[in-house]
Amino acid sequence: MKEQLSRRELKWSRLDNTANLFPVIATERMTNVYRLSLTLEEKVDPVILQQALDKLLPLFDLMNVRLRTGAFWYYFETNRKPAPRVEKETEYPCRKMEPQLNNQYLFRVSYYKRRINLEVFHVLADGMGGVTFLKELACQYLRLAHPELCSQVGDHLSEQTSLNTEDSYLKNFRKGQPKGYKSKPAFHMKGEKLKDGAFGVIQGYLPLDQVKRAAHERSVSINEYLAGVYAYSIYRECLHGAVSDKPLVLCVPVNLRPYFESITTRNFFGMVSAAFEPDHEDYSRDEIEHIIVESLRAQINKENLEKLFSYNVSNQKNLMLRAVPLILKKIVMQWVYQVSARATTTTLTNLGVLKVGEEYQPYIRHFSAILSVSQGQNTKMTICSYGGEMVITFSSILKDVSVQKRFFRTLAEDGIQPAVESNL
């Protein structure tokens, strides 16, 4: 009852620094919606899933909001409508969020056979914030579906679950930092596109120990190993070993929480870019991997990550800029985004190893994640691991899947045995 009363209180809050961009640039094709999925060992009961969502949502201020338009900025307001309806999956993933069709919520929950899907408009949270909600939703579902679990774990959130919604960008920014985005045009993967509205997904399921061994043999981390294979695959299949005056740039989101002791569930990530510029023909895989790895290692440190987000925060805090009407801010933000977007070839994001309580593990088979495409990035890649298995997902609006085939073929050559499935 206390949670229900709290939910009825009308509150408002500012968007975090990164979130301010997403409502400005969202379109039907570039939705800024990501999907997180969890596959159970049993078929999903939609009635119980709806009950789980209804019970859980009032506890999460992060998700229990609607987006409003102010004179100077967008802002969140408590959403006092019922939870969105759980629906059977019938559409392609990562469609544009339509709040007016979703009780004004900025996320949706669907199911398909054994799979529970959570799709989130990035304005709410990054992948780690979304994972927190999905795991608790799944655990609440399992407690309702298997009442005997309640006697083991109780009917409450995990002790590790954070409900913190601070803006960690504002809390940790440092004044006087230089511009954080690059403007040199990068190489873009192009080609014939799928029909309007279509969205291609290719997923590979890999034994995590085999990936660890392959990375260890090349003296790199798992993330560095997969980034190197991805860059090499693009180079061979799109550039065919030729010289290019445009660099191949991999954008890699970095979770900032460990660097700044944050437990926020809102957006708190930084973007680093690993660039490879083919100035002669026929680079080897080892050469490309070395360039990508050195670039990532030089950037992924607290000092550099702080610089990357502090410039944007300083603009948000500038009193003169704050007084500019939102309609004018949107024009400037769209221009800045377009300049920044043309400097990236693709994005690779790794959610890391996901864990749930020991009592829930027998019920959960695996996790996966899908990114929507964005301007200039017609193909993206996501990674997450659970229980000894890694799931790698390519999302794309291109008909040509040669990069994906090269990627998994290269892994197989390294002794990794992927099982691959696709909706194409």
Image (cartoon, rainbow, N blue to C red):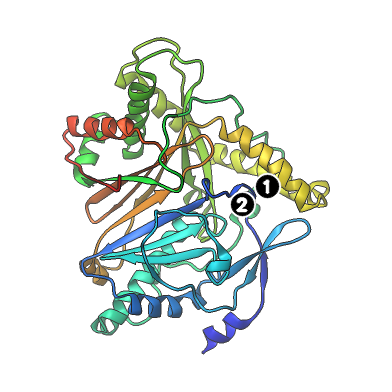
Q: Which residue is mark 2?
A: 169
Q: Position of residue 58 (x, y in %)?
A: 51, 78
Above-or-below relation of 398 to 125: above
Above-or-below relation of 270 to 368: above
Is residue 246 left or right of 389 when viewed as pictured?
Answer: right
Query: Is residue 203 visible from the viewing direction of this image?
Result: yes
Q: Secondary structure at mark 2?
A: helix
Question: Measuring 41% from the left and 62% from the top, which residue is drawn there?
Answer: 118
Q: Amino acid at mark 2?
A: Tyr
* View extreme (bottom): residue: 1
Q: Position of residue 341 (x, y in %)?
A: 57, 35
Question: Measuring 46% from the left and 45% from the top, which residue is drawn there?
Answer: 196
Quadrant location of the C terminus in the rendered image: top left
Question: Measuring 30% from the left and 79% from the top, which residue is drawn there?
Answer: 143
Q: Secondary structure at mark 1?
A: helix
Q: Position of residue 358 (x, y in %)?
A: 25, 68
CA gap between label 1 and label 2 equals: 7 Å
The residue closer to the viewer here, 202 or 149, is: 202
Label 2 crowd bin: few (<14), some (14–19), many (20+), radius 10 Å: many
Q: Amino acid at mark 1?
A: Val
Residue 74 occupies which quadrant of the picture?
bottom right
